[in-house]
Image (tube, rainbow, N blue to C red):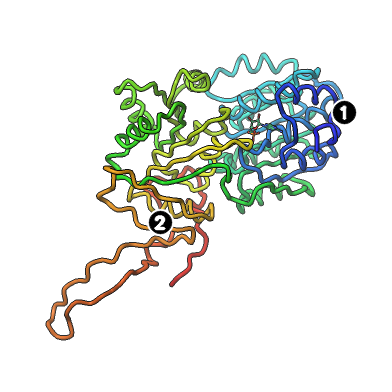
Amino acid sequence: MTFATLGLIEPLLRALETLGYQTPTPVQAQAIPAVLAGRDLMAAAQTGTGKTAGFAVPLLQLLTTEGPKVAANSARALILCPTRELAEQVHASVAEYAQHLPLTTYAVYGGVSINPQMMKLRKGVDILVATPGRLIDLFRQNALKLNQLQTLVLDEADRMLDLGFSEELANIYRMLPKKRQTLLFSATFSDEIRLLAGQMLNDPLTIEVSPRNVAANTVKQWVVPVDKKRKSELFVHLMRKGRWKQVLVFAKTRNGVDALVDKLQGLGINADGIHGDKPQATRQRALDRFKSSEVQILVATDVAARGLDIEDLPLVVNFDLPIVAEDYIHRIGRTGRAGNTGEAISLVCADEVNMLSAIEMLTRQTLTRKMEPDFEPEHRVPDTDASGQVVKKPKKPKKPKTSGGGGKRNLGKWVDSGDAAPVEPSIKPVRKVPVFNTGPRKKK
Ligand code: AMP
């Protein structure tokens, strides 16, 4: 199959050829004809599947071939994204696909001044990429009208809900014209996503290109057990041993990002960090320097790293495991993209065993553990597997208080099904989502 057989017009084919896209990815092969036919879409496609072109390319074609010219302070298509980084990235891709078309595109997001955005919207734009909060601000200040809107795209809808945007989405929903095409993309289909889809979509075509919640199989994943206090030492050791050249590292908190970056910089390692406390311009600069290999190690929180697309990223390191198990899939989706192979290494301490277990359940695989000599943890990380059970080592039996009937008892290996029940992590996510998608547990 080629892009031409999907019925795309010549200026789009030319743009895709320049970008080196030879054959449509599975999500593109399904989404492009459906969007061109005007259908609503509910697509389960994780990052790295080529989903952006899957919705943007046919959307550009529809906007070129159908509909009136864009009016002042209007948009004909709206792409909603959870973060500024993703909005920038999606906009960059849309602009590339649209390079030979007479369409205008623009991205708006918070954290930067609203005035230039209001100015830019005066003439109207064909495709507007936006984060929910800023979109509402612009709408309320009459800088944007949505009555001309033909198509709405919700990109990474699950992430928008994770970040607490459900109220904003409900507000935006009320701002939209009833007659429109809606395309929803999400890495996972939770009950909340299905509810959102039920409200927003009209007889959607459902596309599922990779097995639900299963991480890209082009990524080699493993775990290195280690004591919490020795994580940064282990990171530096592995980095030197493996001669890592370009690594995206995930830490759980903003402080964690800063602490690791300080430590690495103190050792003369070229590292930088991005998190939500840093201004957008600083984040973008760090990202650009990482992309151009000026920065070797980029440490990020989940929110800041959302949607980063760095070509051929060879390695992702989870310095801390994510609090929300689904984030593991998003994180490792930064590597092994579009068929390339990648590696994802997680440094896991005993405290994180329940998160590890939740990830293994979600991805339906038991992650290989590789003990690093000289870094074997004092606090053992209990065994886990894809069934979600955490297997503890047998405890020493207590000495019987009375002498009768006592002696040594062999309790053997035991499974603590009580411990295997879902455990709330110490830090809770901002919204009311189940922290771990652990599902019902088997009891032995
Ligand atoms: P996405 O899932 O949209 O973030 O895309 C992941 C990566 O795959 C991006 O770097 C795209 O430029 C690239 N890509 C998307 N579609 C294709 C294609 N058909 N052929 C080659 N690369 C692609």
Residue that label 2 marks: 423
The quadrant of the picture occupied by the N terminus is: top right
Label 1: element kind: loop
Q: Position of residue 218 (x, y in %)?
A: 57, 42
- How crowded pointer 2 is (Cα within 10 Å; few <14, some 14-19, many 20+) is rated as some
Q: Is residue 145 visible?
A: yes
> In the image, is 443 to the left or to the right of 1?
left
Q: How much space separates mark 1 and mark 2, taking CA atoms?
A: 52 Å
> In the image, is 354 to the left or to the right of 187?
left
Residue at (56, 38) in percent of width and height: 341
Label 2: element kind: loop
Residue that label 1 marks: 66
Residue at (37, 67) in percent of width and height: 415
Could you say which quadrant of the image residue 251 lies in? Answer: top left
Residue at (34, 47) in percent of width and height: 371
Whether the residues at callouts 1 and 2 have beta carbons within 8 Å, the answer is: no
Is residue 250 depicted above or below 274 in this figure? below
